[in-house]
Image: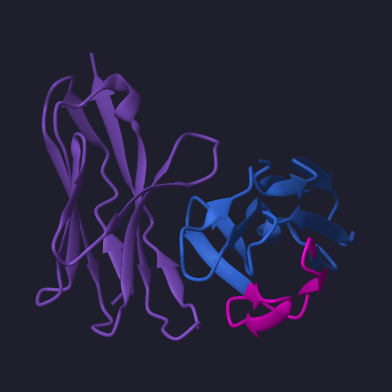
Amino acid sequence: DAGVIQSPRHEVTEMGQEVTLRCKPISGHDYLFWYRQTMMRGLELLIYFNNNVPIDDSGMPEDRFSAKMPNASFSTLKIQPSEPRDSAVYFCASSRGQETQYFGPGTRLLVL
Amino acid sequence: RKEVEQDPGPFNVPEGATVAFNCTYSNSASQSFFWYRQDCRKEPKLLMSVYSSGNEDGRFTAQLNRASQYISLLIRDSKLSDSATYLCVVNMGAGGYQKVTFGTGTKLQVIP
C-alpha cells in the first residue's frame, strides 16, 4: 500500500519565484496536514484539511503561502513569491480521523 | 511558555543503557499524546501512543502524568539503531478538530 507521496523531493529556486509543492495522501484518509521543519523552529503545523476543507490555517506564516485540496487525493502548498527564509523541509501527512498521522518523505526547499 | 517542551539533548548513552525522556505540555485540556521518532533526513514516524494507564512496547515504555502535565518515554537496553530524534506530540483538539503540536525533539545517540 502506497504511503503519502510528495513531489518534488528537492527544489532549488531563486528569491521571488513561485514554488508549488504537491501531496497525495493515503487513500481513505480524511485528514491532510502540511508542516514545515527548520532547525530553529522544529516542526510547525501550517494548515490542515478535513474532507478537503481547510479547517485551521493559523500556522500559515503569511499571505505568500496558500494551500488547496481540490479532491481527496491531491493537495498543493504554494509560496508566491518565495524568500530565502522559506528554506525548510515541508512535510505532508495524512490520517484517518484522529489516528496516527503518516508523513510523506518531505520536500527540501532551498530559496537562494 | 511553549505549548510542548522537550530537552533537546543530545543524550549520548552507551549500548545497553536505559534512557528516559520527558516532555511537558501547557494545555491541561490536551486529549491525546504520542511519541514519534525521526531519523536524520527522514520523515517522522509514530513510535507509540501514550495512554493514561501507561503502555509498553518491547523495550519502550510510555507514561502520561496528567496532574503534572508531562509524558515520558523510557528506552531499555539501548541499541545503536535507537539513535534518532524523539518527538513528543500533543493533540489539544477534540470532536474532530485537531490542534497538533510537536515538540522540537530530543536527540539520542547510542554509542558502541
Position of residue A70 in the picture relative to residue B86 (left or right): right
The quadrant of the picture occupied by the N terminus of chain A is top right
Name above or below for residue A14 compared with residue A2. below
Q: Total label count?
A: 0
Q: Residue at x 46, y 63 (%)?
A: A99
Q: Is residue A94 left or right of residue A16?
A: left
Relative side of A75 to B111, left or right: right
Chain identifier, blue in the render: A
Q: Nearer the viewer, residue A87 or B68?
A: B68
User: Of A108 and B15, which appears nearest the observer?
Assistant: B15
Q: Say if the magenta span includes residue A59.
A: yes
Residue A17, located in which quarter of the rendered image?
bottom right
For residue A104, above or below residue B83: below
Q: Position of residue B41 (x, y in %)?
A: 55, 36
Q: Looking at the picture, how far across and down is residue B68, in whole percent?
A: 10, 74
Is A66 placed above or below A3 here?
Answer: below
Foreground residue among A102 and B80: A102
Where residue A4 sits in the image (x, y, percent)? 67, 49
Q: In this view, does B55 lie to the left or right of A37?
A: left
Extreme residue toward the right, this view: A17
- The magenta region covers A48-75
Q: Does the magenta stretch include residue A55?
A: yes
Q: How did the renderer colour the structure? A: by chain
**x and y, in percent, of residue B82 in the image:** 31, 29
The quarter holding residue B93 reads bottom left
Vertical position of residue B88 compared to residue B45: above or below: below
**Residue drawn at (67%, 54%) of the image:** A26
Colour chain B is painted in: purple
Q: Residue furthest top?
A: B112
Identify the residue at image location x=75%, y=54%: A24
Which residue: 45% across, 86% down? B95
